[in-house]
């Protein structure tokens, strides 16, 4: 079962590498700080949700 914050983050992150969204933008959209978003994304990855990132 996903929390409301987890659901909001999944909706805020578009699918596919061709549609990147910056961490700051995701945090702004879901009204959370970037540290919290990063932790939630990590938890989602552990739960099997393939959310990736690139710094390039």
Image: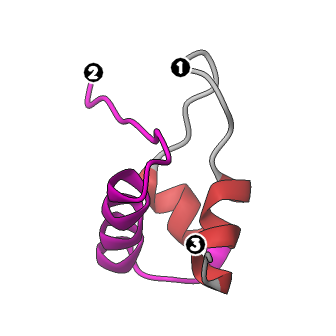
* Foreground disc of the pair 1, 2: 1
Q: Residue at x 50, y 47 (%)?
A: 49
Q: Residue at x 40, y 71 (%)?
A: 40
Label 1, on which residue?
17
Q: Is residue 33 above or below residue 46?
A: below
Q: Tag 1, which secondary structure?
A: loop
Marks 3 and 1, how far apart at CA: 20 Å
Q: Position of residue 42 (x, y in %)?
A: 31, 60
Neighbour tally class for label 1: few under 14, some 14-19, many 20 plus, Cα within 10 Å: few
Q: Nearer the viewer, residue 26 or 3?
A: 3
Colour mode? secondary structure
Neighbour tally class for label 2: few under 14, some 14-19, many 20 plus, Cα within 10 Å: few
Label 3, on which residue?
6
Give me the disc on residue 26. Answer: none
On the image, which quarter does residue 16 sit in? top right
**Range of magenta residues:** 30-56
Marks 1 and 2, how far apart at CA: 11 Å
Counting every numbered tag in the picture gives 3
Q: Is residue 34 above or below residue 52?
A: below
Label 2, on which residue?
56
Q: Are marks 2 and 3 in contact (CB under 8 Å)?
A: no
Q: Is residue 48 above or below residue 50?
A: below
Q: Answer left or right for 13 relative to 44.
A: right
Q: Position of residue 9 (x, y in %)?
A: 61, 64
Q: Are marks 1 and 2 in contact (CB under 8 Å)?
A: no
**Does residue 29 appear anywhere in the picture?**
no
Query: Looking at the figure, which quarter contains the C terminus?
Result: top left
């Amino acid at each position: 079962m996903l929390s409301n914050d987890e659901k909001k983050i999944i909706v805020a992150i578009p699918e596919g590498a061709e549609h990147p969204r910056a961490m700051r933008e995701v945090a702004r959209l879901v009204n959370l700080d970037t540290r919290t978003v990063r932790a939630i994304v990590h938890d989602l990855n552990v739960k099997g949700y393939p959310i990736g990132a690139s710094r390039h």
